[in-house]
Image: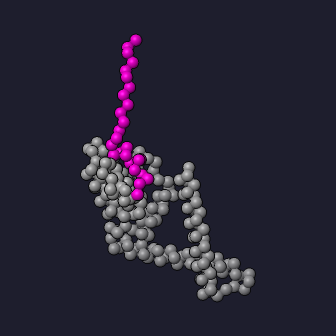
Amino acid sequence: MPPKQRQIRIEQRGSMAAIEALQDRSDEELQAETRHKAAAMAILGARAAERFEAEESRAYFQRAIAAARPQERMQIRRMADASLALAERRAGDLKQAVQRLGQAPPTGRQMFALQAMGLLLPPASAGIVKRVRGIVLILLLIVALLAVGLGIVELIALPFGGIGVAPGVLLGFFLVAAVIAVLVVFGRRRQARAKAR
């Protein structure tokens, strides 16, 4: 019987392994990090992308790639691709970049929300036409929500003799604001439960 080969466990102490350990640190602590500079810059780049600050995210990832070892650069580039696709609200590119990272792609609902955000709030790098289109779409959305609120208020007030247009619009505004507030609270609770899991 041949001798059993001894298994050697290699502990990786590179930047990619350090990302998990550095996740809980504040931005100031990450800026001051010297030992795992590439990991710290990659985390800062991802955080900037979550705030939709594409230029800041790109600058952090460039610093992360410069500080990384050659064997770690490809993974950081993939992280940068995914983060920049998120920051620039490019839903199709985000899905492909996340799959290249080996993670589960965003759900259909998340992709729809990102696409809608890309239409309503295009990134700063978008042209003037896209930004004007975003403003027009936001105004149309507000008018549509007010019209729906007015319609619901008019429908409720109809058995009581109806209501004027001006008070109806005001009550419709309050109704829409209340519904949006309830949806926001409900969504935050769902996020908190998902994070707890």
Q: In the rendered image, is residue 145 in sight?
A: yes
Instruction: Give the percent coordinates (x, y) of residue 134.
Output: 42, 72
In the image, 151: left or right of 36? Answer: right
Q: Is residue 112 above or below residue 17?
A: below
Q: Please identify the quarter of the rendering in which residue 179 is found.
A: bottom right
- Residue at image position (43%, 47%) is 103
| Closest to the observer, 102 or 140 | 102
- Residue at image position (60%, 68%) is 182
Please provide the residue range marked out in magenta.
1-26
Instruction: Give the percent coordinates (x, y) of residue 87.
Output: 38, 61
Instruction: Give the percent coordinates (x, y) of residue 41.
Output: 33, 54
In the image, 54: left or right of 154? Answer: left
- Residue at image position (71%, 82%) is 158
- Report if residue 20 lies within the magenta region: yes
| Closest to the observer, 139 or 104 | 104
Outermost residue toward the top? 1
Q: Please identify the quarter of the rendering in which residue 188 is found.
A: bottom right
Image quadrant in which the N terminus is located: top left
Instruction: Give the percent coordinates (x, y) of residue 12.
Output: 35, 38
Q: How is the image coloured?
A: one colour
| Closest to the observer, 12 or 159 | 12
Q: In the rendered image, is residue 74 in sight?
A: no
Type of secondary structure dominating the magenta stretch: loop
- Report if residue 114 lies within the magenta region: no
Q: Is residue 182 above or below residue 9?
A: below
In the image, 80: left or right of 160? Answer: left
